[in-house]
Amino acid sequence: MKALVLSHAHPAFSIGGAQVASYNLFTGLKNMAGWDAHYMAGVGPPVARHAATPLMSLGQAPDETLFWTDDYDWFHLGSTDLDGLMRHFERFLSDLRPDVVNFHHMMGFGIQAIRSTRRALGDVPIVFTLHEYLPICAHHGQMIKARSHGLCLRATASDCGLCFPEIGAAAMKRRELFIKSFFRDVDAFVSPSRFLLERFEAWGLPRQKLVMIENGLDGGAVAPPRTVAAGGRRNRFAYFGQLNPFKGIRVLVDAVTRIPDKVWGDSILYIFGGNLEHQPEEFQAQVRELFRLAGRRLRFMGSYKSADLPHLMREVDWTIVPSTWWENAPVVIQEAFHHGRPIIASDIGGMAEKVRDGIDGLHFRVSNPESLAETMVRALSDPLLWERLRRGIEKPTDQASAARQHADLFGQLIARRDALRLNHG
């Protein structure tokens, strides 16, 4: 059997949870007996397009292909280069002839790629892996109110119209119907969190098509616990991730400045993150001011790559996930647990689902720096807490296990398709 795994970007060029999860799945399937796999990823500027075709290799392996695009409609999740999809993408599919196609994101390709797959391959099963809420929410897929920045509990055309009055409820409804018209061609939707599946079921996706499978992690060598002198404290905290308005970096640094000196002592917060320069200027200014106020309590270490984590984790006791949006299944949670680091996380969505309060980590009230400060004080003040939470950590799903679960799903869909063919034969 051959699976085609598609991602909006290649992890060699763009680090993100969906890229890493999709590539790990591709690698896991390749290593399974009876399965072969091909990986296709979107790419765009500043990479230059080939003159004759959007299909590229850029030195990747023979079973990896890049699809160049720079014509994406963010509002409708659609492509405006339908000629490229129909002429080049469909030809690629016809030549490859996969037995199953698994999409991770629509960015770049456009949601019309689902219909192109159906035209090129007929009734070959199509699986769509959900990584966030973009089909539901036009506000960057965050399900956060555009004006108040409060958490959004449901998505309806009227509610979304209030978020974007310049667009209006009618256009929001047309957007929803447009996206769902392509989703009807999908045979199964996979998500690594139950919380996200519940959101999409409430939005109207058929429950029988929703499948929960954890992302597979290839975490590398496990970093040993940081060496602490007798009587020393587990007082090294770290944030890993993008620096954007939804990841809670302002909440985190604000919390650190609130902890009394006598409690904080020689503790350190490491910030491993990038892309601050690409954020709105107001947000950049707020973060830099908070960094200044934190002073020597904070070490801004810049961006990192997944391969760096075993080394970086050696100096870390606690990982903090302070996102102010629901999240889904942040790869940083899996990575921290892989290295045996307890997590302090916001008490909502996929974070609350993946981090068990008092068992393998601690919760704090989302968007509340005072609550986070109190939780960090607890972590600093209880000498037995870190080891107890560390013992409660369960090993995250690895690459091979996730690939097996996906292969089982793909096999079921292929068998169902074959049965329908037989019944209609």
Image (tube, helix red, strand yellow):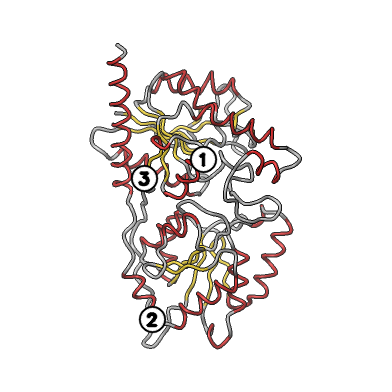
Amino acid under disc 1: Ala
Amino acid under disc 3: Ile
Q: Residue at x 35, y 75 (%)?
A: 387
Q: Residues within 10 Å of mark 1 (few under 14, many from 20)?
A: many
Q: Position of residue 71 (x, y in %)?
A: 63, 31
- Helix, strand or loop at label 1? It is loop
Residue 358, compared with residue 304, is above or below; it is: below
- Helix, strand or loop at label 3? It is loop
- Helix, strand or loop at label 2? It is loop
Q: Residues within 10 Å of mark 2 (few under 14, many from 20)?
A: few
Spot the residue most to the left. Answer: 33
Q: Position of residue 143 (x, y in %)?
A: 59, 49
What label does residue 213 carry, if any? 3
Residue 242, compared with residue 189, is above or below; it is: below
Give whichever of 189, 199 is nearer the camera.
199
Distance CA(mark 3)–CA(mark 1)? 21 Å
Distance CA(mark 2)–CA(mark 1)? 40 Å
Q: Quadrant of residue 77?
A: top right
What label does residue 9 carry, if any? 1
Residue 70, compared with residue 399, is above or below; it is: above
Q: Residue at x 47, y 38 (%)?
A: 104
Amino acid under disc 2: Val
Give whichever of 344, 181 is nearer the camera.
181
Instruction: Judge left or right: residue 331 versus residue 414.
Output: right
Residue located beneath label 2 in the image: 228
